[in-house]
Image (tube, helix red, strand yellow):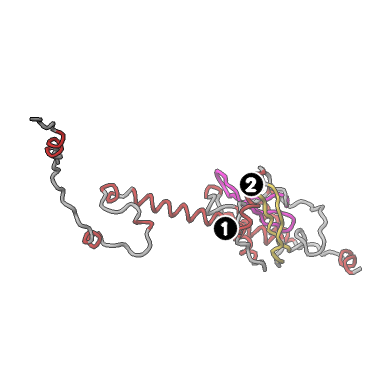
Amino acid sequence: EVDDAVLLLPTREPSSATTASSNSAASTFSAFAPTTNTRKYPPGLPGESGNVALNIYDLGRSTGSQAINKVLGHVGMGVFHCGVEIYGKEWSFRRSVQGSGIFACRPHCCPGHHFSESMPMGHVRINKAEVLRLISSMSRGWSGAQYNTLRRNCCHFSREFCDRLEVNADFPSRILAAAEAAAQIEEAGAECWASMSSPQARKGSICLLRCCRQGPPVDEDEENEDIHVVEKLPVQTIRPDFSDVWEMRKPKRRF
């Protein structure tokens, strides 16, 4: 009865200033203009006004990525695509040649990925127009040409978007765990390669694995103090003496 009473309350028409502001903010993303949401949600679920959800997908459509995520899930990581759902739209980030990489789609329906789960992130107290203004301001710093699989992908955008919305829930660490681990491995490999490609390494004056050692660098002179050079000895050919053997085998004369 309470829900029906709320639904029957007369709605106030928006003022002309609010309408103009909403139209100007929506013009930036005219391709994703708000449409009538016919989906019905129970109270407190994503899609209601002000509720935010993190929609998580298995990366790609292949069954291989789903199997990988099941295995990596035991160690708290995986390969995912993410989008943030608010006011019936799901916002995410992708690579593009020019312009902003931020885009919107229907919730749970991002093309090219397999939907896995939706995590409620909390409730926000901003309206649709303010969300569009926030997206417009973020689009300047999220160029599609700056997309990076390990350091600036859709999951990084979703985390920042949730922070800017000031949601109550913390962003799940498992979403970015695999990308952060791969980025650290890539950085370590680049440092090792730079050390091996240095002029000192090519001359053989330093150890090629020094970049992988722990602790401060060691002075080369101190290392050389413990090295003892063994002088080469002349090679001598030793021939065995078979004279005794020959005498024993020599036939004896009979008288």
Q: Nearer the viewer, residue 159 or 99?
A: 159
For this rendering, which residue is in front, 64 or 37? 64
Marker disc for residue 255: none
Residue wearing tag 2: 65
Residue at 71% in and 57% down: 118
Q: Is residue 62 visible?
A: yes
The answer to whether marks 1 and 2 mark residues whose Cβ atoms lie closer than 8 Å is: no
Which segment is the magenta one?
80-107
Could you tell me the amino acid type at mark 1?
Ala
Q: Provide residue 139's location: percent of width, then percent of height.
A: 59, 54
Q: Is residue 94 magenta?
A: yes
Q: In the image, what residue type sits under mark 2?
A: Ser
Q: Is residue 212 left or right of residue 83?
A: left
Packing grade of label 1 (10 A; few <14, some 14-19, many >=20) is some
Image quarter (top left, top right, bottom left or bottom right) of the N terminus: bottom right
* Image: 107 above or below 6: above
Quarter location, residue 137? bottom right
Residue 134: quarter of image: bottom right
Q: Position of residue 186 (x, y in %)?
A: 46, 52
Specify the label residue 177 is tagged with: 1
